[in-house]
Structure formats: structure tokens, C-alpha cells
Image: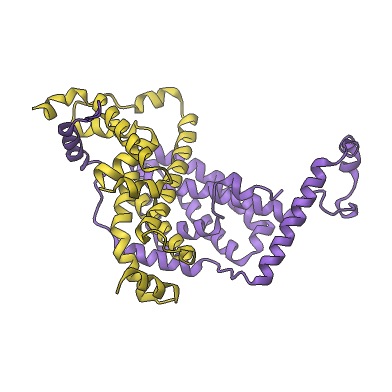
Amino acid sequence: MMDQHEDPRFEAWLRKAAESYHAPDPTPRDVMWQRIQTARRQKPVIVLRPWMAWAMAAAAVLILGIGIGRWTATPTGRGNPVAVATTPLANSDSGLAAPSPDVVYQVAATQYLSRTEAFLTSFRTDLGKNHAANSARFAGQARDLLTTTQLMLDSPAGKDQRMRSLLEDLELVLMQISQLDPAHGGHDADLITQGMNQSNVLPKLRSAIPAGPVPVRTEGAL
Amino acid sequence: MDESQLIARVRAGDGEAERALYDAHVDRVYRLAFRLAGDDALAQDFTQETFIRAFDRLGSFRGDAAFSTWLHTITTTVVLNGLRKVKRFRQREADIDDAHEIGAMQRHAEPDLKVRLKQAIEALPEGYRTVFLMHDVEGYTHEEIGAALGVETGTSKAQLSRARAKLRVALADFAGEWTT
């Protein structure tokens, strides 16, 4: 029996009409292949040896135990925030009372990189749509991100050679975007986009960001 | 050489086999990414990300299902997550703009079929839109869609039926074109 919505004539018409919806360009095989190869070469490879797996499992159990301990601790300790605030971290018995600065910077770096990735992706796809209005907006956002980039370069996150190189690439791109002039048309933007493609900034950025949405990437780090 | 031999060679680190595997599947991955994203730069990004993940995780491919099914699971995950990220970013920017500007940017209904169809497809819920584009436009079977999206085949069929019903209502002005 035919479903009440089923109508072969409509379905055939719809299929034909929908062929023009987001009709793909010819596949740029070689361009994408080059970028895939470059991104894979730059991706850090971590070979998980058996002892590492055991060490990670032990660390996970330890963290879980500490978490449960903190969760189930009597409220007497929690009721004395002044003592916590005035006790130097180095004198803390557990040493786990607060996250280490490196972890904090790592979380901040992940959040910053995710924001920058979303920004650059949007810049590349949206700027051409309404150049005059969008270039002013993108320039403003780039200035904000540029400030953060420069702070990141001076932070412990910038001590890592790979991260430093990425931050320097981003600094250059953001600086160019922050100077976009709405009156200049799309030529400057095209040059920036070409530069981004040549230096492989987005693939590098993506490979520096742990998989998963931002809250998941940073979950449990603090 | 069949695909399982090709995959074994890729696992053994054979660069030529890697390229051959890529060539065998890249068209379909890129086409799907383009249909869903509607933008060449995004489609390229998503295709690249799909293959980077696929090559990195090839060790976990057990061969229970076809390689293409496994690859399309990665593709849909990458594309849908990527599009959500872009949408969230655009939404945040739109919230910052003033209401007048947003009102001015909205398009009014157009009599043109192409424009109306685009609007109607984009107004579909994400699941309906994905199934409709995969099945009716790119020719995937319900079994392939179910495997790629992690849903039952029946769910895929139901979503397609609902998508078509919604499109039929949205395109009612053009009814003369399919009834004659």
C-alpha cells in the first residue's frame, strides 16, 4: 500500500530539481592530497608503548581516586576558604589543591585555538559574501584574537617550539586581517586566503587542537 | 588488487597504496561534503580532515563493514560537527549585529524554484536534510545512510519521508510542475 506522503511523480520531480542544490565542483584531488600529506607530516605521532598504556591507566585511576576523595570529603575543609586562599600552593599537603599553571595555559590554549579555527574558517567562507560590511567586522575580531595570540606567545604555551611556530603563523594572518580596508575590495582578502592556503595554517591549527568539542577537550583538565 | 589488499598495503606504510585508496573514494567524500556544506573551501577542509582521520585510524578498521561505509561514517561526523561549529560562530556574530541589520539581510520569498528549493532544504531539521541529500541527491542507500549516521535503516526511511513531506508543503506553489 502506498504511504500517504508517497507520490512517485513528486519524488522524481524533486530529485531532478534538487540536483542543482549545492552542485559540487570537479574534485580538486591533487590540491587536497598535497594538503593531507603536509598535515599528516606535521602531526605529532605518539606511539603508545605497552608501559605507557599501563602508566596512563594508573594515572587515570589515581585521578579518579583523588576526584572521588574530593567529592566525598567532609564539608569541614570546604567551609574554610580563607585558609585555602592564604596557604601557598607549594606548602599544600597534596600538591593537587590547584591546577598547575601549565595545565591552565594548556586549557586556555585549546580554547583560543578553537576560537581562532572557527574565526579563520568563517573568514575564508563568509568574507566574499558582503565584503564591505564583513571586512570591518572581521578586522575587529582579528584585533581581539591578535592580542590573545601575542599574550599566548609570551606565556608558557609559547615555549613549545611547535606551538610557537603555529602562533607566529597565526599572528601574521591575524595581523593582515586586522588591517583589512573595506574600501579596497576583495583583493587583499584573496591574498590573505592564498597565504593561508600556502602556509597550511588551518590544517596545522586543526592538528594542534585535540579532537572533540571544546568542553570535552578541556574537561577534567582543571 | 582488491580493496582489502590495498588497505593491508596502506597499513604497511605503502604511500602509493594510500594514494590509490584516496583516489578510489575522494570523489564521493568530496561530493557529499559539498552537498552538505555548499561551499568549496569548507568541502575541501572536510574532505581533507576525513582522510587524515581515516589514515590515522585505519588500524582500528576491522573490515566488518565495507571500507566505504566506515569512511562515510567519518565523513558525516566531520562535516556535521564542522557545520555546527561554523553555524555557532555565525550565530554568535549575528547576535552581536543590531536587529535592523539582521532584518535588512533577510531575503524575501523568491518566485524562482532554485531559490525556493534552497530555502526549503535549508529549513529542514539537520537529520532530515542529511538523509534527503544523501539518498535523493547523492544516491546512498538507506543501509549506507543508517551505517554512516549510526541510526536504524527504518529511521533513515522515516526521516526521508518526513523531509519529502515538508518539501512538498514548502514547494506547493510549484505543484503544477509535478502533477502535469
The colour chain B appears in is yellow
**Residue found at x 28% / y 28%:** B165
Looking at the image, is B110 positioned above or below residue A105?
Answer: above
**Residue found at x 58% / y 52%:** A149
**Residue found at x 33% / y 69%:** B3
Does residue A211 appear in this view?
A: yes
Name the side, left or right, on which A182 lies relative to B60: left
Chain that is purple in the image = A
Name the side, left or right, on which A191 lies relative to B175: right
In the orientation shown, which residue stands out farthest toward the front?
Answer: A1
Image location of residue A216, percent across then percent down:
60, 47
Quadrant holding the N terminus of chain A: top left
- Residue A102 found in image quarter: bottom right
What count of labels does the image hold? 0
Does residue A185 appear in this view?
A: no
Looking at the image, is A157 positioned above or below residue B38?
Answer: below
- Residue A17 found in image quarter: top left
Q: Nearer the viewer, residue B1 or A136?
A: B1
Image location of residue B50, percent across then percent down:
41, 57
Image location of residue B139, percent across then percent down:
25, 48
- Residue B22 found in image quarter: bottom left
